[in-house]
Amino acid sequence: MRATLLVAMLVAGMIDDAAAQPAQVLIDPSDQYAMTLMSISRRTPAAELDALNARLAARKGAKIVSWETFAKMIGNEISQFVRRNDYPEVDLAAAMPQVLLRYEGTPIGITWNGGLAITGNDYRHAAKTFTAYNADPASDAARKVSDRRRDPVHPSNHLDALLYKR
């Protein structure tokens, strides 16, 4: 509970602990099946940031924004990217700042259907279901996995593990 309150206060700008916040966030929606988010440490050398910016230049819509800007815009970014929200009960806009704070430098994907992709299997599943959805939205392959335990991109499966409070 304390950690959640701290994160909420940081995101809301109620406390200014620069060391606790990443400097920036990478947002890369160029893969249609998953938008990648990754927090960038304040300790990242300038040469690495330059190299990252050079790689992003070739990726349509990819950008790096300040942590403060990210905190204000993440809900809008998610709603614009997600084509069909299969998980409306999960508030990704509230969860993602917590995840990115805890896992600085780790790419996390928000899938086309509102799921989360972390592993290669998650990204493959998102790509496969996105392709099926584009071909025929009513197809079995495009449907949400009915059993949460078997759904590789169900956000609660990942968030429960990622934000487990010790």
Image (spheres, grey):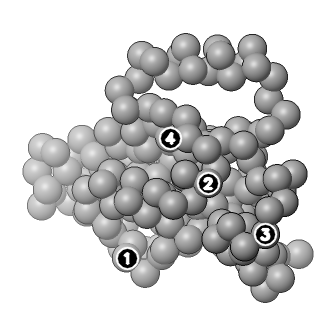
Q: Which mark is residue 113?
A: none
- Tell me what residue is drawn at x 50 percent, y 22 percent: 56
Q: Which of the labelled discs sits on residue 68, or is there none?
A: 2
Residue found farthest to the bottom = 1
Which residue is identified by label 4?
A: 27
| Disc 3 crowd, CA 10 A, few/some/many (<14, 14-19, 20+) | few
Separation of marks 4 and 1 at Cα, in angstroms: 21 Å
Image marks 2 and 1: residues in contact by CB distance under 8 Å = no
- The tag earlier along the polypeptide, 4 or 2, is 4
Residues at circles 4 and 1 in contact by the CB criterion of under 8 Å: no
Query: Badge 3 is on which residue?
Result: 15
User: Is residue 113 at all visible to an observer of this figure?
Assistant: no
Three-letter code, disc 2: Glu
Determine crowd level at label 4: few under 14, some 14-19, many 20+ residues with C-alpha closer than 10 A: many
Relative to 96, say whether 3 is above or below. Answer: below
Marks 2 and 1 sit apart, C-alpha to C-alpha, by 25 Å
Q: Amino acid at mark 4?
A: Ile
Between 149 and 75, the one lying in front of the other is 75
Q: Nearer the viewer, residue 30 or 113?
A: 30
Q: Amino acid at mark 1?
A: Pro
Label 3 vs 1, first from the N-terminus: 3
Cβ–Cβ under 8 Å for marks 3 and 1: no
Q: Label 2 crowding class (10 Å Cα cut-off): few <14, some 14-19, many 20+? A: some
Q: Which badge, 2 or 3, is on the more N-terminal residue?
A: 3
Q: CA distance from mark 4 to mark 2?
A: 14 Å
Residue 107 rendering spot, x and y as whole percentages: 62, 41
Q: In the rendered image of this protein, does residue 146 appear above or below residue 153?
A: below
Kindly identify the residue that appears in the image at 16 percent across and 45 percent down.
134
Q: What residue is drawn where x is 51% and y is 47%?
A: 109
- Tag 4 near tag 3, CB within 8 Å: no
The residue pinned by badge 1 equals 88
Residue at disc 2, secondary structure: helix
